[in-house]
Image (cartoon, helix red, strand yellow):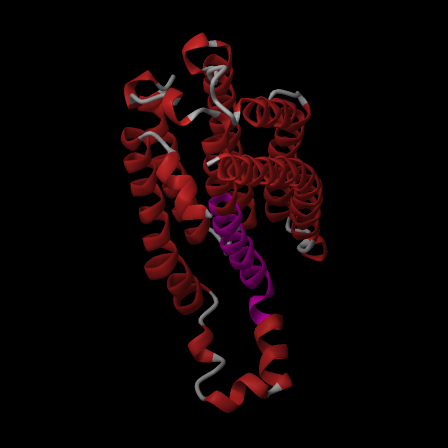
C-alpha cells in the first residue's frame, strides 16, 4: 500500500522526499537514540549486566538521579517518531488527490520548494539541539517551541501548495477518469483537515505553551526555587499529551473518511472489472 502510493507521486518530487526521509531514518538509527542512551541517560552506569534490568532498585536509582533527562529523552524519541509518521501519512494521502495523468510533475513548480530543504535541515538542527539540551529544560522548551514553529510553517506551505493545485484546471481529474468522484471526495476531506484554522490555532497554542514553560523554567533556575523543579516538566508533558490527544482525534477522523473513500473506489473498480468481463 505504502510503496504503491509512493510510486504514484511525481518522480522529481518523489526522489527529493525519499532522500529527506532516508536522512531521518539514518539519524534515528545511528545517532539520536544511541547518544541519548549512552551520553545523557548513561544507561551503562546503571545496567552493567543483564540482571540489572530486572532490579527494581536499579530502576529506582535511575529515576531518582536521571528522571528529568529520561523524560526529555523520551520526548525527543516521541517527536522523531510522530513527525516522521505525520510526514509520511501526508505524502501517502497526496497520491489519491490527483489523476495519474494530471499530477504536478516539476519540483520547481512547488511553491517554496527551496525553503523545503531549509525546513527539513532546520528540523534536524533543532532535534540535535533538543538532544544536547535534555539536561536543561529551560533551553529544551525554547528549542521545542522553534520545532513546532517549523512544523507550523511546513503545514502552511503544504496547505498553500494544495490550494494552488486544487484550483488549477490542469490538475483537475478529467471527465473520463473513472476515479474522479473519489478524487474529489478525498479533496473535500483534505480541505477540511488542512484548510481550517483549528490546526493553526492548536499549533500556535502549543508554541506559546512551550515558550511559557521555558520562561517558567528559567525563572525557577534563576530564583533557586528547588521545590518547583518539576513544575516545568508537568507543564510540557501536559502540553504534549493534550496536543497529541487532539491531533490523534483529527488524524483518526481524516483517516477513517479517506479509508471509506478508498473502500468505495475499490468496490467500484471491482464492479467495473466484473462488468467488463461479462461483456467480453
Q: Nearer the viewer, residue 97 or 226?
A: 97
Q: Is residue 4 above or below residue 192?
A: below
Residue 5 is situated, as x and y percent measured from the top left of the image, at: 43, 40
Quadrant in which residue 190 is drawn: top right
Q: Residue drawn at (37%, 33%), measured in percent from left and top?
A: 9
Q: Is residue 55 left or right of residue 246?
A: left
Bounds of the magenta segment: 65-84
Q: Is residue 248 magenta?
A: no
Q: Which image quadrant is residue 170 in?
A: top left
Q: Give the residue displayed 40% in from the left and 69% down from the top.
A: 38
Residue 231 image position (x, y, % from top left): 70, 51
Left or right for 194, reference 102:
right
Q: State the image coordinates of residue 214 (x, y, percent, origin top left).
A: 59, 40
The one nearer the camera, 75 or 137, is: 75
**Residue 254 in view, yes or no:** yes
Measured from the top left, where is residue 252 in percent x and y? Answer: 67, 42
Residue at the far front: name it. Answer: 280
- Closer to the camera, 184 or 51? 184
State yes or no: residue 70 in magenta: yes
Residue 15 or residue 279, whichever sits in front: 279
Name the residue located 32 percent from the left edge and 60 percent from the top edge.
30
Residue 129 seen from this side: no
Q: Is residue 19 left or right of residue 97?
A: left
What residue is shown at x 43% (from left), y 62% (from top)?
A: 36
Amino acid at each position: 500500500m505504502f510503496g504503491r502510493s509512493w510510486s504514484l507521486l511525481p518522480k522529481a518530487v518523489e526522489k527529493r522526499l525519499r532522500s529527506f526521509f532516508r536522512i531521518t531514518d539514518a539519524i534515528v538509527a545511528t545517532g539520536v537514540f544511541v547518544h541519548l542512551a549512552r551520553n545523557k541517560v548513561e544507561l551503562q552506569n546503571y545496567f552493567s549486566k543483564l540482571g540489572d534490568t530486572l532490579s527494581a532498585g536499579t530502576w529506582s536509582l535511575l529515576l531518582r538521579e536521571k528522571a528529568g533527562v529520561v523524560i526529555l529523552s523520551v520526548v525527543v524519541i516521541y517527536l522523531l517518531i510522530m513527525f516522521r509518521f505525520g510526514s509520511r501519512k501526508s505524502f501517502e494521502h497526496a497520491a489519491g488527490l490527483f489523476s495519474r495523468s494530471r499530477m504536478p510533475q516539476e519540483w520547481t513548480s512547488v511553491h517554496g520548494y527551496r525553503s523545503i530543504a531549509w525546513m527539513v535541515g532546520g528540523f534536524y538542527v533543532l532535534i540535535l539541539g533538543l538532544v544536547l539540551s535534555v539536561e536543561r529544560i529551560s533551553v529544551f522548551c525554547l528549542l521545542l517551541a522553534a520545532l513546532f514553529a517549523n512544523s507550523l510553517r511546513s503545514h502552511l506551505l503544504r496547505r498553500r501548495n494544495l490550494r494552488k493545485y486544487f484550483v488549477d484546471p490542469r490538475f483537475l481529474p478529467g471527465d473520463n477518469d473513472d476515479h474522479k468522484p473519489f478524487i474529489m471526495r478525498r479533496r473535500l476531506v483534505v480541505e477540511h483537515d488542512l484548510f481550517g484554522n483549528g490546526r493553526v490555532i492548536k499549533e500556535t497554542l502549543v508554541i506559546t505553551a512551550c515558550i511559557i514553560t521555558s520562561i517558567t523554567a528559567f525563572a525557577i533556575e534563576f530564583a533557586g526555587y528547588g521545590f518547583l523543579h518539576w513544575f516545568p516538566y508537568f507543564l510540557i508533558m501536559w502540553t504534549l499529551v493534550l496536543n497529541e490527544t487532539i491531533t490523534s482525534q483529527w488524524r483518526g477522523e481524516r483517516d477513517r473518511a479517506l479509508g471509506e473513500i478508498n473502500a468505495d473506489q475499490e468496490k467500484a473498480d471491482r464492479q467495473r472489472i466484473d462488468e467488463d468481463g461479462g461483456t467480453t
